[in-house]
């Protein structure tokens, strides 16, 4: 056996897989913002994305803390924004778990997506959005195929807001953290917009961890220490599926309800740590 040849092959096979940028993705960074990062983007904030395609951050971004200007505005579809491990920082900070107060907010948003009133497909992933006074992530016109994943959304006025232009569309959220925002961690603005939330956390938000609409599903999440119920699906006729979620210390803990669902589709495996069983 020729070990010198086999060992390098084993090392390559065992190496961690690294996420790679989409070939041809257009760069966004603090230097190009001064002159405009690509066609259609004027100098300064916000970075304006007006064409479908893939975009990647190559530095952290920090719009002026005293400004109402958003960091990134998207008005096209489909669009992929790869934060590439970087932070989009609005400068605000919050204290308390759950949050009791915040300071330093301007009236701006981290990322604002829209598609001119038509269902859009957006993918935002792999980074941190923090400290924005209007909201960390706002998605208007969210259509089927929109995905938020591998994100940390923290210390914003509210974490993420999903607004669909048509009913019964599904936004997928996975492997993300919504931590210590001044209102909810993630909210759908229309009770008929659906979320599929998987393997994510909602911790220490001042109000509710996740606010979901009719037909939403939450599987494998950790939802704890939020000021109100950990999860809400309570609009008239709302039915949501819950499975393998862990609830703890929401709504003050103890005997208080950990979640509120008008019609629960129990998929099994939910755990409420302060209770013998989840309701």
Image (cartoon, rainbow, N blue to C red):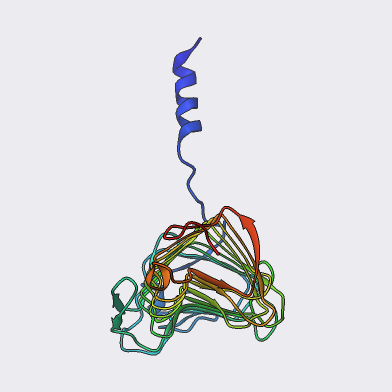
Q: Residue at x 67, y 75 (%)?
A: 214
Task: Give x and y (percent) for residue 111.
Answer: 48, 77
Task: Give x and y (percent) for residue 128.
Answer: 41, 66
85 vs 210: above or below: above
Res 38 visible:
no
140 vs 205: above or below: below
Residue found farthest to the top: 1
Res 56 visible:
yes
- Is residue 49 or residue 240 the one in the foreground? 240
Task: Give x and y (percent) for residue 163.
Answer: 60, 81
Task: Give x and y (percent) for residue 72.
Answer: 47, 78
Question: Number of numbered discs present?
Answer: 0
Q: Is residue 58 left or right of residue 219?
A: left
In which quadrant will I find the C terminus? bottom right
Q: Is residue 168 left or right of residue 154?
A: right
């Amino acid at each position: 056996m020729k070990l010198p040849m086999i060992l390098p092959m084993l090392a390559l096979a065992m190496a961690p897989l690294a996420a790679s940028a989409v070939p041809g993705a257009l760069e966004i960074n603090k230097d190009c913002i001064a002159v405009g990062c690509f066609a259609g983007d004027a100098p300064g904030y916000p970075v304006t994305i007006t064409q479908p395609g893939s975009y990647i951050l190559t530095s952290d971004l920090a719009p002026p803390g005293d400004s109402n200007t958003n960091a990134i505005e998207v008005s096209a579809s489909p669009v992929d924004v790869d934060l590439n491990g970087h932070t989009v920082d609005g400068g605000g900070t919050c204290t308390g778990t759950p949050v009791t107060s915040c300071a330093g907010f301007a009236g701006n948003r981290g990322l604002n997506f829209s598609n001119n009133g038509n269902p859009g497909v957006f993918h935002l992933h792999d980074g941190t959005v923090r400290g924005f006074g209007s909201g960390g992530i706002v998605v208007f016109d969210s259509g089927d195929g929109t995905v938020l994943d591998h994100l940390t959304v923290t210390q914003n006025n509210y974490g993420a807001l999903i607004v669909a232009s048509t009913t019964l569309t599904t936004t997928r959220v996975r492997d993300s953290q919504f931590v210590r925002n001044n209102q909810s961690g993630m909210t759908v603005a229309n009770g008929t917009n659906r979320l599929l939330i998987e393997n994510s956390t909602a911790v220490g938000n001042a109000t509710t961890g996740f606010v979901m609409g009719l037909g939403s599903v939450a599987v494998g999440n950790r939802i704890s220490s939020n000021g109100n119920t950990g999860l809400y699906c309570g609009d008239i006729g709302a039915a949501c599926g819950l499975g393998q979620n862990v609830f703890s210390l929401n709504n003050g803990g103890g005997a208080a309800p950990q979640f509120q669902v008008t019609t629960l589709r129990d998929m099994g495996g939910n755990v409420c740590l302060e209770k013998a069983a989840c309701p």
